[in-house]
Amino acid sequence: MSQSKFWKNSTVYQIYPRSFCDSNGDGVGDIPGIISKLDYLKSLGVDVIWLSPVYKSPNDDNGYDISDYKDIHEEFGTMADFDELLAEAKARGIKIIMDLVINHTSDEHEWFERAKAGEEKYKNYYIIKKGKNGKLPNNWGNFFADCPWEPFGDPKNEEYYLHLFSKKQPDLNWYNPEVYREICDIMRFWLDKGVAGFRCDVINVIFKESFADGKKQLALTGKEHYVSTDGCHRILASLRRDVMDNYDAFTVGETVLVNVPMARDLTDVERDELDMVFAFEHMECDQIGVKWFKTKFKPKRLMKCLTKWQTGLDWNTCYFENHDQPRSVTRFTEGGEFRKVGSKMLIGLNFSLRGTPFFYQGQEIGMTNGAFNSLDEIMDIESHNVDKMAKSLGIIQPFRWNLINKTSRDNARTPMQWSAAEGAGFTSGTPWLKIHPNFTEVNVENDLADKDGIIAFFKRMNEFKKSSDVLTCGSFKSLHEGRSVYAFEREYEGEKLIAICNFSTKRAAFPDGIIGERIISNYYGEDKKLRPYEFVLIKPEETKK
Ligand code: GLC
Ligand code: CA
């Protein structure tokens, strides 16, 4: 038996187009580059590609600032290239989902330009508020360490527009039914072309319930007024009814700051809003308060969090990486000599949890955090804003750099490492972002040539998961959450599998009472103990208690 919804049986691979493959030597990845790698993705067993934005954009936030939702960014190619990508993917049985960014547009979108030119109709597409006695409309914070209000039009009018992200990303006004209609139309445009759904960018903050001052906090003051509001639920249910229900497609919402009950509501089958959500709690297990303050990674925190979500939500998205997070092997393992085995462990774990597994480009070869020497080498707008903010707080440069170097989103955005050739097989030109110097060793060609490569393990796990009702449909039960060892059981119709991970460079004891046949591991042979970063799937022998 497999799950009846196709996205429950799918392995999803995220492409960050700018950094994936450059076909014309301008240093920027593009759609023809992606087409040239479809056979590779097919060979990995990828079912669905999530494409980060390829729409027309001035690129302030690498495409998450859209100036035309129905056109392709010229650096990435043309609409004809996109149509070809869709057709070539389809020919290989691969579906594509688009990134749908509808909390905000670019300030260079025609709607915002017409709003600035004074057209009332378009002013009402955005959130424009009056300042109060020379002060900003409210005390809210901003996701990119900036002020979320920017003067709109003539300063005499004391008007400001809201932008929860960069100032080139004005928030849309979801109180306006015309905005709703425009977005429905955009969604249909892509679904009619044959895309299989959407990853919905910061979807749970689109509806601001009130614009009152927020309770003061370290970051994101005001969030209680816009995170997963009733209005947001209403919009999602309507989008489902008016648009999504007419297609065999799915949505996965990027939902910031959600807890388990909120995620349950957003994915509740009865409420019929989103199919899945990306939650972030497990991405926060190595930070204090805000994401820029990393602390030493304690595996137990991660285990507890995974268990909480696995048991709290019926169907999760399982992921350890995306284009906004540092690389998982750097974050959750010691890397170095353990890079390969550690990458495999995280991949094994991701395939063994209950839910749809998502992988990010380069994860299948164990790409590591970027090797940047200074802020000059970093392009991410968020990192630059954080530096400015930290500077204004009097934090000294070496300390600022240390924070940014560890947390910058560019860590995951360095160009894909295809080979040891100059330009890493990514480009024949000058890459838009510095290639990690370890590309001579860490690259697809090398890994494929290695029968014990990470890709080989990825494929084995992927094939096994698809053939196993226990892994695709089974229930989840945590068995052990230790200092370094995590063990959990999956069960389906009486059949069981136990996954065990050792998050340590040291050998560790098997949790008590777990014995059985080894099905898949990132090590050869038997051993009385778990080896460093060992991952093993065990078919348990039923033992008497
Ligand atoms: C999401 C995207 C991120 C982007 C932000 C604003 O978090 O993943 O890359 O900067 O939304 O659109
Ligand atoms: Ca290019």
Image (cartoon, rainbow, N blue to C red):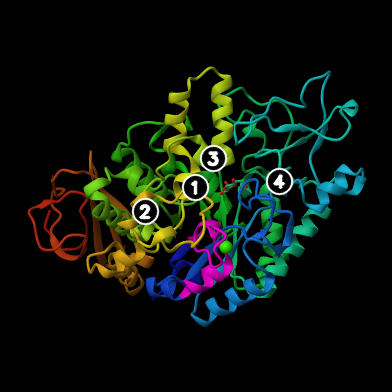
Image point (15%, 51%), residue name: 531
Q: Which label sits in the foreground, 3 or 2? A: 2
Q: Which residue is mark 2?
A: 367
Residues at discs 1 and 2 in contact (Cβ within 8 Å): no
Q: Which residue is mark 1?
A: 279
Secondary structure found at label 4? helix
Secondary structure found at label 2? loop
Mark before the other along the chain sequence, 3 or 4: 4
Asked whether residue 502 is in view, the answer is no
Residues at discs 4 and 2 in contact (Cβ within 8 Å): no
From mark 1 to mark 3, how far is it between C-alphas? 8 Å
Asked whether residue 97 is in view, the answer is yes
Q: Which of the numbered marks, if any, corresponds to residue 231?
A: 4
Q: Which residues are magenta?
A: 14-38
From mark 3 to mark 2, how far is it between C-alphas? 27 Å
* Residue 343 position in % (x across, y down): 30, 54
Q: Nearer the viewer, residue 278 or 378?
A: 378
Q: Is residue 54 magenta?
A: no
Mark before the other along the chain sequence, 3 or 2: 3
Mark before the other along the chain sequence, 4 or 2: 4
Question: In the rendered image, which quarter contains the N terminus?
Answer: bottom left
Quadrant position of residue 282: top left
